[in-house]
Image: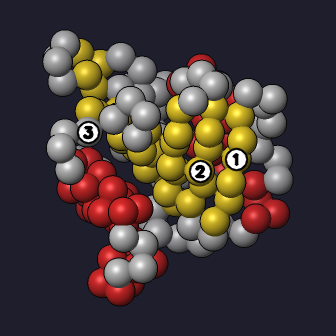
Amino acid sequence: MHCYYIFFVKDDVYQDYFFKTDLVAHFFCSYLREPNREDLNRQFYFITQAIHKNALKALPQNHNQSIHFKERMLTIYRNESLLNDYHLLQHLEDRHRPCFILDLTNQDYGWLTPLNSRKEWQVFNREKKQLQCYHYQRLEAL
């Protein structure tokens, strides 16, 4: 089962840290390991934005996934890759941009929407030095 964390990031943080995905991923991994640590908790609330639960009611449901909502993030458990769920990705991009995604199962991370707002998802694969599908990168010993 795949586990994804989707964080709703404030626009100014998105603009300032779009090309610093390693730093953002490192922060969110640290926060997930120690959510009660006061300095990480304050920083988390400073860089993320609250999303009202009602705004997420229209999320496409899938019998192969379980979605858990917290005020500033989603946790999604799926039997298959999130990249295969075009409707969910499109919904998040259209309504809750910008989002940062951590895929701890495959050790990937990245922004949901490219900075130039193209309607295609791309992932950077460091090993193959090519764009695939999202703006994902591999997590490295964080």
Which residue is found at the position 82% from the left and 53% from the top? Answer: 57
Residue 126, x across and y down, in percent: 18, 24
- Image height check: is 74 above or below 80? below
Classify 10 Å Cα crowding around label 3: few (below 14), some (14-19), many (20 and above): some
Which element type, helix, strand or loop, lies under badge 1? strand
Q: What is the number of the mark on residue 75? A: 2
Q: Is residue 88 left or right of residue 50?
A: right
Looking at the image, residue 96 lies above or below residue 31: above
Residue labelled with disc 1: 67
Does label 3 or label 1 sit earlier along the sequence?
A: 1
Can you give x and y, in whole percent of width and height, for residue 21 in the image? 26, 48
Q: Is residue 133 left or right of residue 60?
A: left
According to the picture, the residue beneath numbered tag 3 turns out to be 139
Name which of mark 2 and mark 3 comes first in the sequence.
Answer: 2
Answer whether labels 1 and 2 touch (C-beta < 8 Å): yes
- The image quarter in which residue 125 lies: top left
Quadrant of the image containing the N terminus: top right
Compared with 138, 49 (above or below) is: below
Q: Residue at 43% across / 50% down in the picture?
A: 100
Separation (CA) of disc 2 from disc 3: 18 Å
Mark 1 surroundings within 10 Å by alpha-carbon count, few (fewer than 14), some (14 through 19), many (20 or more): some
Q: Residue at x 75, y 55 (%)?
A: 56
